[in-house]
Amino acid sequence: MNWKYRIEKAIIYILLILSVSPITLGYLWLLISSFSRKTEGLRSLGWTLGNWSFLSAPPFGRNYASIWLVTLNTLLVALTMTAIVVLVSSLAGYALSRMKFTGRKTFLSLTLILHAFPSVTLLIPIYFVLRWISKIPLVGRGMPLIGGFGFNTIGGVALVMVAFQLPFGIWIMKGFFDNISWDMERSALIDGASRFQVWRQIMMPNIKPGMASLAIFAFIYGWNAYLIPFTFTIGRAGKTAVLSVYLQNFQGDTVMTNWNMVTAVGLFQLIPVMLFFIFTQKYLLNIYGGGAKGGA
Amino acid sequence: MRIDNNLEGEKTPSLSIPQAREISSARAPFKGNLTAFGFMAPTVLVVTLFFFLPVVMILFLSLTGLDMTNFGKLKWWLPANWDLANYLKIFTNKFFPKILGNTIIYTGLTLCLFNVGMGLVLALLTTNIDRRAGFFFRMIWLLPRITPVVVYIIMWKALAGPDPMGIINHYILVPLGLSDGELLINIYPWVFVILTNGFIGASFGMIIFTSAIESIPKDYTMASKVDGASTWQNIRYIVIPMIRWPLLFVTTYQTLSLLTSFEYILLLTEGGPRLYQTEVWALMAYHKALTSYFGNTQWGYGSAWAVILVIIGVVMAIVYLRIFRFRELVQEPRIETL
């Protein structure tokens, strides 16, 4: 019995190690390649720091934006998107969890339907919606930093991602609100506080872990995104480029792709997410359990 | 369980103060609505702009021939300009059977092998070893999901790369004489399309199945082991029947996700390497309407491809709502009975 049990366990471990080998080899290669002149399989043919020269100067001359501008863009997209998603979904989540109003049931079913609905199928009309927003003065274009919420702006890209994440965010936030006891809120209401005051002063401090989970999730999504920034910005390496688009462009732009430099840029984009993941995995697991959408 | 519910049902009204409830309902139905709508307003704005409006627009667009050449001139919102020409064009397209077949192969194989199959296997394996080790392996499987998509695809390009650089070629296929060292994505594009999507998709099922398996009472598996059931019998007759709802959920949910996802294919093969070799339905819509590499972007025609997916999406989303979680939804908030 004992040896049979041990063999079973050993087989399980072997299978699991085999299953994660493509992923781990991929990361290992990324690391080795970014510090090598050339690689053969996983073996470096000479170590160098030269691949990281993109940090100080745009690698292909003036047509390319500096990596720091691109990083700033990516950061702005991710942060704008995160801020809006967290704010809007905690407002709506609160109303759906704690208030009785006409159409509440409809809103709830709608949130779930939208959560399951594949939003990528709507990219074509969203392109036109963004062009309309561009025409609105002030909101459309010309805002400082994020450039507005129209087509080919940081804010516009962030707004589309907000729309894609919102049903999920509302659902998650409603869940977090549902788990908070009613008593404090009830006594505040009896003492004459308004619903907004209750939300702001009583609920928000209690819901911080929930907001943190959603914020981390949204930030990673925004930082990693490729399709939406690629579709709704022009000038692939220009003023509104984000890291994903920049990196993808990088691969096609030289006659012979310099993979070592590509991996260095890739690692540059990956490192912050990895650090984030390592320190916040407990929060994230809450959310992935609730179901990430898209991708596959 | 039922007794508990009854108790709670009786308790709630007795907690509330009758007079207060009457007062609040007398003065507040309208004001209460107004406050709630205030909280909902930003959501309503976003959902209208990016869901309702687009769904209507894409229906209209699909009925017109809007493209780069007549943009700004063609009034696509007027019924006078509508016809079914785009749909006719889709079904008479020479490559229509090819693309339909691709979509079925892609969705079916990725779903069976990875999103459900691998997800279930991983959940079973990681729940059968030491808890912390199981957690560790699940964490590694989550990594592809948090890796930037472009970086993730670069990693697969390296795994599948030509001989001296590519890992699979260099260490396995070339030494065994199974390959002459070319880029594997060009030789077996489907294998890599399914692998790249599958390694992302498997973790979704894995997490849901893991929590479902962990919530199966230990007595059941104990009892079956005492009765002499093998591991396989245990899985087949205890675990699988107990997690059939999560299984159904993951299967249906991931079918829809896969049917409409194309980002990884776009990055890996762009529908190639040979003409339409790995082009799936959703990618076709995107290519026709939003990428101008091949000259003209045809918004109308692309929309017609996408509309069919939108309809499938809406119908399936409503079906999920009916099957899953609906009972949770209808619970009324108790705070209103102050």
Image (spheres, helix red, strand yellow):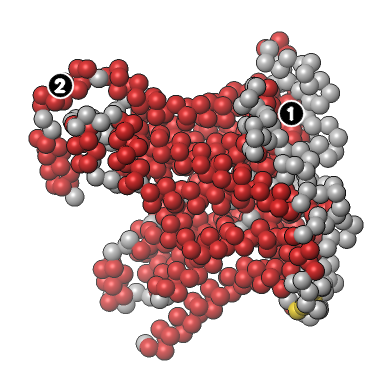
At horizontal 61% and vertical 44% (from top left) the residue drawn is A76
Give above or below for A265 relative to B225: above
Q: Which of the two discs, 2 and 1, sits closer to the camera?
A: 2
Q: Observer-nearest residue: B46 or A17?
A: B46
Local crowd size for mark 1, using a 10 Å CA cut-off: few (<14), some (14–19), many (≥20): many
Residue A60 picture location, percent across and down = 85, 54
Task: Determine if residue B169 is in view.
Answer: no
Q: Between B8 and B219, which is closer to the camera in this rendering? A: B8
Q: Residue at x 88, y 61 (%)?
A: A256
User: Which structural element holds mark 2?
Assistant: helix
Residue plotted at (24% across, 45% down) = A181
Q: Which quadrant of the view contains residue A240? A: top right
Quadrant containing the C terminus of chain B in the rendered view: top left
The disc at residue B22 is: 2
| Disc 2: host chain | B
Residue on which disc 1 sits: B299
Disc 2/disc 1 C-alpha distance (Å): 56 Å
| Residue B268 in the image, given as x and y percentages of width and height | 73, 54
Q: x and y percent of residue A82 in the render? A: 52, 44
Instruction: Provide the secondary structure element on which disc 1 rests.
Output: helix
Amino acid type indicated by mark 1: Trp
- Give the farthest residue toward the right: A255
On whether disc 2 and disc 1 are found on a single subunit, the reply is: yes
